[in-house]
């Protein structure tokens, strides 16, 4: 299964996938600040969420950031929108940043 990796630089773009492809979204995050990336619109039924994990940068300093890595599987043909937001849990209506992709899945 081919994998496509995207980052903040691809926000706002259109991504074409084939059914069975893996989509990896890697976004800078520092959870010690309280800001975490979360899925706001998951592009269902075109994509199905596989996992989300925080990967530290490798810096040993306390409070060092890293990347939130989301993995999705292109499940069904169609067009949809994937939207992620960076926010503090206690302020769900005040995102600090957004990440959007238009998803087109073909057979």
Image: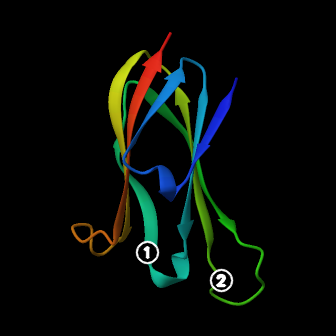
**Total of numbered circles in the picture?**
2
Gap between marks 1 and 2, in whole Å?
A: 13 Å
Residue 11 on image: x %, y %: 42, 51
Q: Secondary structure at mark 2?
A: loop
Residue 47, placed above or below residue 27:
above
Write the residue at 34% across / 24% down: 79
- Picture quadrant where residue 90 is located: bottom left
Task: Name, please, the residue furthest toward the bottom.
Answer: 62
Residue 27 shows which numbered tag? none
In the image, residue 75 lies at what x, y percent? 50, 21
Q: Horizontal placement of 42 versus 20: left or right? A: left
Q: Residue at x 42, y 15 (%)?
A: 77
Q: Give the x, y percent position of residue 7.
A: 55, 54
Residue extending farthest top: 107
- Mark 1 surroundings within 10 Å by alpha-carbon count, few (fewer than 14), some (14 through 19), many (20 or more): some
Q: Which residue is mark 2?
A: 64
Residue at image coords 60%, 25%: 21
Q: From the top left corner, tell me how far across and down residue 15 is, in percent.
A: 46, 33
Quarter of the image for residue 19 reads top right
Looking at the picture, tell me which residue is in the foreground, 27 or 88.
Answer: 27
User: Is 66 positioned to the left or the right of 91 in the image?
Assistant: right
Chain-order first, disc 1 or disc 2: 1
Q: In the image, what residue occupies the spot 54% across and 82% down?
A: 32
Quarter of the image for the N terminus: give it: top right
Q: Which residue is mark 1?
A: 35
For the rendered model, the colour scheme is: rainbow
User: Pointers 1 and 2 in contact (CB under 8 A)?
Assistant: no
Task: Judge the density around disc 2: few (<14), some (14-19), many (≥20) Cα neighbours within 10 Å.
Answer: some
Q: Quadrant of residue 29?
A: bottom right
SS category of the residue bearing label 1:
strand
């Amino acid at each position: 299964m081919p994998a496509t990796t995207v980052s903040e630089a691809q926000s706002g773009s259109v991504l074409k996938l084939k059914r069975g492809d893996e989509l990896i979204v890697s976004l800078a995050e520092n959870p010690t600040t309280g800001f975490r990336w979360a899925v706001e619109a998951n592009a269902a039924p075109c994509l199905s969420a596989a996992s989300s994990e925080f990967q530290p940068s490798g810096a040993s300093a306390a409070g060092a950031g890293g990347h939130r890595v989301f993995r999705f599987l292109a499940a069904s043909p169609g067009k949809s929108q994937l939207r992620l937001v960076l926010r503090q849990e206690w302020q769900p209506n005040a995102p600090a940043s957004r990440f959007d992709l238009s998803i087109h899945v073909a057979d």
